[in-house]
Amino acid sequence: DAGITQSPRHKVTETGTPVTLRCHQTENHRYMYWYRQDPGHGLRLIHYSYGVKDTDKGEVSDGYSVSRSKTEDFLLTLESATSSQTSVYFCAISDGGGDEQFFGPGTRLTVL
Amino acid sequence: AQKVTQAQTEISVVEKEDVTLDCVYETRDTTYYLFWYKQPPSGELVFLIRRNSFDEQNEISGRYSWNFQKSTSSFNFTITASQVVDSAVYFCALSFHAGGTSYGKLTFGQGTILTVHP
């Protein structure tokens, strides 16, 4: 299994508070991704990174920011959480742009 | 824009039946990649297969087989002799390769919930 961890695994927070989710990999893969999974929508890309300090927006990036200061870590920040951001968040990594992606275990976030 | 459609929201079968999960995609790119992932009740996402747009050969892996047809923009997944352990949500996904660059951004279908009854 690819070495990907996500922290925290579960989080309950209140509307308006900042939240940071962490994705950590031990595979030295270049590409990292953040997706959210919601019923009826499958998984949707939030942000991705193609190298240290190289990031770009995905399909549903509003309300989210990311940072990647080291190859192994990719942080997702909700500056001011809203109830619509209640979701399961998955991090993924891949070695090449067209290669298969390996997913972390997911973080279940509830915004009250 | 890329789009992946999995028209079957839920499928229910009895063990040992064969089942086919449909996936239809839309893309204007000539180079692209198709994937299938499995999400068992435990919630993790498990990679099953990757196929590039230039390789239309069908693939078989044990009880699993995949049928890729560019003419109909479909990449269907068949499980032969289904088992209870096959119960999961299955996702089809697409990434494209534009202008010599592929960042691997996946577009997922909505998923098909497969339930295999004993």
Image (cartoon, coloured by chain):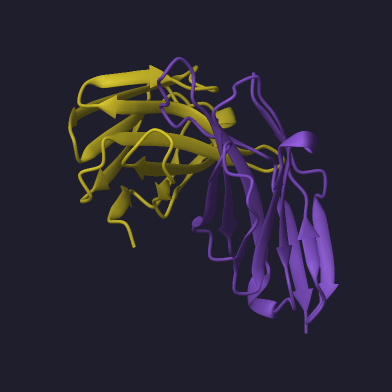
Identity of the residue furthest to the left in this view: A70
Q: Colour of chain B?
A: purple
Query: Where, by quadrant of the figure, is residue B54 drawn?
Result: top right
Query: Where, by quadrant of the figure, is residue A38 drawn?
Result: top right
The answer to whether A11 is drawn above or below residue B71 in the figure is below
The answer to whether A41 is drawn above or below residue B112 in the figure is above
Q: Which chain is yellow?
A: A
The percent coordinates of residue A48 (x first, y second) are 38, 28
Residue located at (80% from left, 37% from top): B72
**Viewport quadrant of the C terminus of chain B:** bottom right
The percent coordinates of residue B39 (x first, y second) are 58, 58
Residue located at (42% from left, 35% from top): A34
The percent coordinates of residue A8 (x first, y second) are 34, 49
Q: Is residue A29 visible?
A: yes
Residue located at (82% from left, 43% from top): B7
Q: Is residue A18 visible?
A: no
Looking at the image, which is closer to me, B92 or A76? B92
In this picture, residue B4 sits left or right of residue B48: right
Looking at the image, which is closer to me, B92 or B31? B31
